[in-house]
Image (cartoon, rainbow, N blue to C red):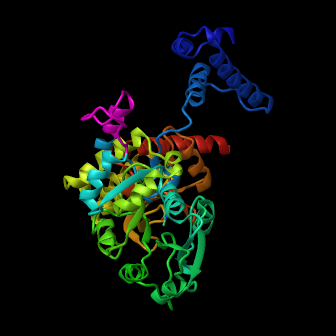
C-alpha cells in the first residue's frame, strides 16, 4: 500500500481528491487481487497502479452521466427524453452561470413575470392568446384542474382515463387537484351527446386527454375536438385538451400526419391545451399551457403555480428552442426532430459504416450483421408509429448477449442498446453525431473483453 500510494502516477488523484479516497480505492483493488489469489487464480500480470486509476475513475464519476442511446427510441424517458439543441444548451449555460432578468421587467425596473419571457414566442407559434409554463406536463394538468375545477366537476370520457408512465393517472391527478371526476361514455365509445348530458351547474370543465401510449382499434368512437368545443359553447363550459406530446410542426413526425399540432388544436376553439416541453417539441422538461388569457390568468394566480414553477435554466432552453421554431430552423437543429426525420437510406448507410468498423475491431468474437428494423418515437407519444430503420446486430460467440449489454452499460460512457432474440441491436437513429459513431467500436470491444474476463 505504501509503495502504491507513493507512485507518481497517483499524484494528480491525491492532489484532487486527497488521501482518503485514493487509499480506499487502492484498498479495494488490493482486496480484490488477494481474493483472486485465495481462489487459486493465477497472479495478474497487469499493472496494479493502472487498476487503482481505473477504480478511482469509476468511483469519482458523477451519478448523472451522459450515455450513448443506441436503442433508436428518440424520446426515451429513461435516458432523459429530448436532447437539447446546441443553441438551447448554450442559452442554459449563459443564464445558469450568472444573474438574469428572470422576474425583473428591465423597462420599468418593477417585478416581472417569468411566464412573460416565453409567452410572446408561444403566442406567435401557436396562435394562443397567452401561455403559462410550469415544471412538466403532469404539473400543468394538475394546476389546470386545481385552478379551474376544484370542488366542481370535470367531465372526461371513460376511454381517456389513461395512465402515462411514471404514475401519471388521470383519475388520481384529478383527485389530487380537488376536482370531481365525472366519467362519461364507455371504454370504447363516447359521443358528444354524452358530454352534453353530463353538464350541470356543477360542471367546471370538459377535458379531452390524449390517449398517448396506447391505441384503440375496432368498434370505437369519440367526438372530434370541434364537436366537443361546440358542446362547451352550447353549455357555457370551457374545454381543455391535454395533448401530451405537443407537436409544434404540422408534419413534425414522419408517418404520423394525423397527429394534431398545437396551433391546429387551438384553432378548433378549445380554450386551453397542455403539453410537454421535452416530447415532440424537443426542448427541456416543461409543461406548457396555451389558450385564453382570462383562464390562464386564473391558472397563474393559483397557489399551486408557485409550487410547480419552472426555473431559469428551463426557460432559457425553452426560449432558445422556440426561437429555432420561429426562425424556421427547428427541423435542422432540434435533435429530436432531426432523429425522427432520418430516412431509411441514411440509416442504412450509417448502420453499414458502423458494422464495417465493428467487424474490423471485433474479429471473430462477435457475429456482426445489418438488419431492417423499426425505431420508436418514445415517451408515450405515437405508440402506433414504427419508424423504419436499419440496425447493427451483434451476436457474441461465447458470451450471453445479456452480459454484453450489462458490460456496455458499465462502460464509460455507458452504451444503452436493445436486446432481442440473443442479439444486441444498435440503432443508428439515436447515435448522435460522428463522434459517438467513432467511439462505439472501441466501447463495444472493451465491453466484450470485460464481459469475457468476468465470464471466465
Ligand atoms: C406525457 C403525458 C403527460 C405527462 O407529461 P410530463 O411532461 O411527462 O409530465 C400528461 N398527459 C399526457 C396525455 C401525456 O402524454
Q: Is residue 15 above or below residue 296?
A: above
**Quarter-of-image position of residue 168:** bottom right
Range of magenta residues = 89-114
Q: Position of residue 88 (x, y in %)?
A: 32, 43
Picture quadrant of residue 182: bottom right
Image position of 339 (left or right of 425) = left
Relative to residue 209, is residue 95 drawn left or right? left
* Residue farthest to the right, as pictured: 38
Q: Is residue 153 left or right of residue 334?
A: right
Magenta segment main secondary structure: loop
Residue shown at the point (22%, 54%) measured from the top left: 326
Residue 423: say if magenta.
Answer: no
The residue that appears at 36% across and 27% down in the rendered structure is 98
> Residue 222: image x %, image y %?
46, 85
Locate the C terminus and report the quarter of the image it occupies.
Answer: top right
Q: Residue furthest front?
A: 201
On the image, the x and y values in percent for residue 220 come to: 49, 88
Residue 136's place in the image compared with 245, above or below, is: above
**Residue, far left:** 327
Q: Which quadrant of the rendered structure holds the N terminus? A: top right
Using the image as rendered, state which of residue 406 and residue 73 is in the foreground: 73
Vertically, is 90 above or below 366?
above
Decide which of 178, 190 is in the foreground and name it. 178
Residue 246 in the image, given as x and y percentages of width and height = 38, 63
- The reply to whether residue 279 is visible in this rendering is no
Specify whether residue 105 is painted magenta: yes
> Residue at point 48% right, 57% down?
140
* Rendering quarter of residue 311: top left
Residue 406 appears in the figure: yes
Amino acid at each position: 500500500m505504501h509503495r502504491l500510494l507513493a507512485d507518481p502516477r497517483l499524484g494528480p488523484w491525491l492532489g484532487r481528491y486527497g488521501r482518503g479516497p485514493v487509499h480506499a480505492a487502492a484498498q479495494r483493488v488490493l482486496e480484490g487481487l488477494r481474493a483472486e489469489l485465495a481462489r487459486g487464480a493465477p497472479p495478474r500480470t497487469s499493472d496494479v497502479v493502472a487498476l487503482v486509476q481505473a477504480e478511482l475513475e469509476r468511483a469519482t464519476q458523477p451519478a448523472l452521466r451522459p450515455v450513448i442511446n443506441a436503442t433508436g427510441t428518440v424520446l426515451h424517458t429513461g435516458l432523459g427524453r429530448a436532447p437539447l439543441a446546441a443553441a438551447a444548451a448554450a442559452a442554459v449555460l449563459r443564464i445558469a452561470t450568472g444573474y438574469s432578468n428572470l422576474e425583473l421587467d428591465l423597462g420599468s425596473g418593477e417585478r416581472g413575470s417569468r411566464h412573460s419571457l416565453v409567452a410572446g414566442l408561444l403566442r406567435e407559434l401557436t396562435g394562443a392568446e397567452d401561455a403559462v409554463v410550469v415544471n412538466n406536463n403532469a404539473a400543468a394538468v394538475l394546476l389546470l384542474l386545481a385552478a379551474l375545477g376544484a370542488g366542481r366537476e370535470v367531465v372526461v370520457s371513460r376511454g381517456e382515463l389513461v395512465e402515462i408512465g411514471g404514475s401519471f393517472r388521470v383519475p388520481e391527478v384529478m383527485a389530487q387537484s380537488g376536482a370531481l371526476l365525472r366519467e362519461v361514455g364507455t371504454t370504447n365509445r363516447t359521443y358528444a351527446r354524452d358530454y352534453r348530458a353530463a353538464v350541470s351547474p356543477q360542471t367546471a370543465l370538459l377535458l379531452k386527454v390524449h390517449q398517448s401510449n396506447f391505441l384503440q382499434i375496432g368498434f370505437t368512437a369519440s367526438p372530434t375536438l370541434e364537436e366537443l368545443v361546440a358542446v362547451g359553447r352550447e353549455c357555457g363550459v370551457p374545454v381543455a385538451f391535454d395533448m401530451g406530446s405537443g407537436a409544434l410542426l404540422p408534419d413534425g413526425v414522419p408517418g404520423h400526419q394525423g397527429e394534431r399540432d398545437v396551433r391546429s388544436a387551438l384553432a378548433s376553439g378549445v380554450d386551453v391545451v397542455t403539453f410537454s416541453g421535452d416530447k415532440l417539441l424537443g426542448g427541456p422538461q416543461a409543461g406548457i399551457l396555451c389558450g385564453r388569457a382570462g383562464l390562464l390568468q386564473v391558472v397563474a394566480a393559483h397557489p399551486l403555480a408557485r409550487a410547480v414553477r419552472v426555473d431559469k435554466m428551463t426557460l432559457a432552453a425553452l426560449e432558445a428552442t422556440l426561437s429555432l421554431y420561429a426562425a424556421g430552423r427547428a427541423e435542422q437543429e432540434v435533435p429530436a426532430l432531426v432523429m425522427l426525420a432520418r430516412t431509411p437510406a441514411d440509416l442504412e448507410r450509417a448502420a453499414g459504416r458502423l458494422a464495417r468498423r465493428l467487424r474490423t475491431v471485433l474479429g471473430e468474437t462477435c457475429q456482426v450483421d445489418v438488419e431492417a428494423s423499426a425505431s420508436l418515437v418514445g415517451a408515450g407519444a405515437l405508440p402506433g408509429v414504427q419508424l423504419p430503420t436499419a440496425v447493427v446486430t451483434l451476436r457474441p460467440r461465447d458470451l450471453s448477449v445479456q452480459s454484453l449489454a450489462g458490460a456496455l452499460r458499465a462502460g464509460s460512457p455507458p452504451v444503452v442498446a436493445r436486446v432481442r432474440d440473443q442479439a444486441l441491436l444498435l440503432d443508428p437513429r439515436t447515435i448522435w453525431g460522428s463522434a459517438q459513431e467513432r467511439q462505439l467500436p472501441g466501447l463495444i470491444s472493451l465491453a466484450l473483453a470485460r464481459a469475457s474476463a468476468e465470464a471466465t
